[in-house]
Amino acid sequence: MTGKTLLDIRGVHTFYGNIQALNGVDVTVNDGEIVALIGANGAGKSTLMMTIFGAPRARSGKIVFAGTDITQLPTHEIARLRIAQSPEGRRIFPRMTVLENLQMGASLDKMKHFDEDVEKVFVLFPRLKERIDQRGGTLSGGEQQMLSIGRALMARPKLLLLDEPSLGLAPLVVKQIFDAIRELNRTQGLTVFLVEQNAFGALKLATRGYVMVNGNVTMSGTGKQLLADPDVRAAYLEGGRH
Amino acid sequence: MQYFIQQLINGLTLGSLYGLIAIGYTMVYGIVGMINFAHGDIFMVGAFIALIVFLILAALFYSVPVVVALLVMMIVAMLFTALYNWVIEKVAYRPLRGSFRLAPLITAIGMSITLSNFVQVTQGPRNKPIPPMISEVYNIYGVSISLKQIVIFVVTAVLLAIFSYLVNKTSLGRAQRACEQDQKMAALLGIDVDRTISITFIIGAALAAVAGTLFLMYYGVVVFSDGFVPGVKAFTAAVLGGIGSIPGAVIGGLLIGLIESLWSAYFSIDYKDVAAFSILAIVLIFLPSGILGRPEVEKV
Ligand SMILES: Nc1ncnc2c1ncn2[C@@H]1O[C@H](COP(=O)(O)OP(=O)(O)OP(=O)(O)O)[C@@H](O)[C@H]1O
Ligand SMILES: [Mg+2]
């Protein structure tokens, strides 16, 4: 069940030097929702995910998480409010083992539930258990993706941000990850905000979705509405099959 | 043969000190990517603080057991030297983080001059001697090893054991390594990067302070300019071992110590520094990133 507003992004503008990447973005994520953000390459999706963490910092606008204004908080303090991200490019610590990467994820939880949570991650991604002592930098792309998501889950987040979780993964693993997200959402009420190139899968999974074009949110609605929308279909769904 | 073993022991003594100092260079380089040229002077400051503690102890008490005196000197030197380095990082380096690469380097050189001048002005420009703290020498099959040398080996070994446990097994060490590899990601996981960098400077300074205390005990004298040559040697050790690698710093330190004393013993004492630097140059031709350094290219 979805509840009150968990993340509220209002009129956010973000710049890289003089280049404007976000141009007054409004997005809301409610407690217990899965919200998808879709858009073309360079639309500003990853920038929005990172702006939530203040890296880069929003030049104007406001971001509120669970009632706290986080717009100007240092990145690590934002994370400590229990927002976890599997960021673009995965950002696995290359010279740490799989286990150490997961321990890093659990540092937000002060390692309190490490043994229990790491088992859950291994159930989700048995592959990681086989690779437990391997260095992150030598994992395959797909394995790194699994580790990045697993590491984010280790934080016991209230809000999980996923930037293209399906990138580089085999269709079967993508399905497995989407199923896992749905499951975590249903059983534990985990709130998820995800960016996806795989618009079809994401909108099917999501409670609601947003479409971003050139740093602006141009459309929003329930997953079903967006899937049925002719413009969305033309730009993000059928376009991909040509 | 005895002569060779004798030189080996002397070289390892010196090398232990270089290794302790080199760790500070390598850790700071690993986490903020700068060469902290003031680190040699931090070592010298550590030796001076140990000297001051020695003089205070000597003035206050009729006699103090050597072990106690040495421990107190070491601990106080670690605390104050760490405080120096913590402040230096905060006021001189942190504001320049993210500016062009030469800026922190130039500041570090400035900081190095500042520290040695400060000590020169406040402590005087002359050699500061202390009476010998430990004078026992053992003779084993014609090889003499002094208790001072044994103290240096034991303290270095214990310290390195504690330190490697800290870096490899604790959450603090993990956070430190995470910041070395990807600061942005570490912050996304709730790690306070600024604090972690501060701690790195504190640890590096504490190790240099121990080296300073041992240096004072071993040579019985210290002067304001003593930061320079050992500092450059330790920096060389860090590069030789592979800058950024902690075991590399220790190995590099021991090697530089060995080269120096073997060269002085068999060739010419005047050219011992030239020998150390020549070996560095040769090693870097064949192993551009040092003995344990990682190649620049990496699959991420
Ligand atoms: N560090 C940076 N410096 C300058 N410009 C940047 C930087 N990062 C992103 N940009 C620019 O900001 C815009 C938005 O980039 P962003 O990465 O947010 O897009 P995206 O929607 O995530 O794209 P993709 O689907 O390809 O991941 C792009 O035009 C990009 O070139
Ligand atoms: Mg992106």
Image (cartoon, coloured by chain):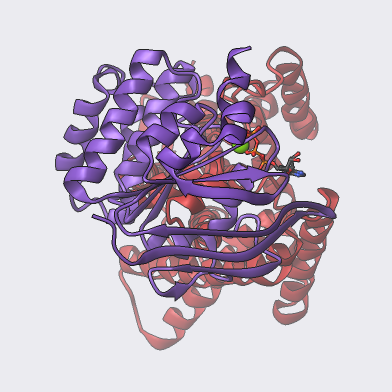
Chain colours: A purple, B red
Q: Residue at x 63, y 12 (%)?
A: A242
The answer to whether any part of residue A105 appears in the image is yes
In the image, A240 versus B282, the foreground residue is: A240
Q: Residue furthest left?
A: A116
Q: Position of residue B16 (x, y in %)?
A: 50, 40
Q: Is residue B258 left or right of residue B53?
A: right
Q: Residue at x 38, y 66 (%)?
A: A5
Q: Residue at x 68, y 16 (%)?
A: B287
The answer to whether any part of residue B147 appears in the image is no
Q: Position of residue B193 (x, y in %)?
A: 53, 57
Q: Residue furthest bottom?
A: B60
Image quadrant assignment for residue B39: bottom right
Q: Residue at x 42, y 27 (%)?
A: A201
On-image quarter of the N terminus of chain A: bottom left
In the image, B58 versus B225, the foreground residue is: B225
Q: Position of residue A51 (x, y in %)?
A: 60, 56
In the image, B7 versus A99, the foreground residue is: A99
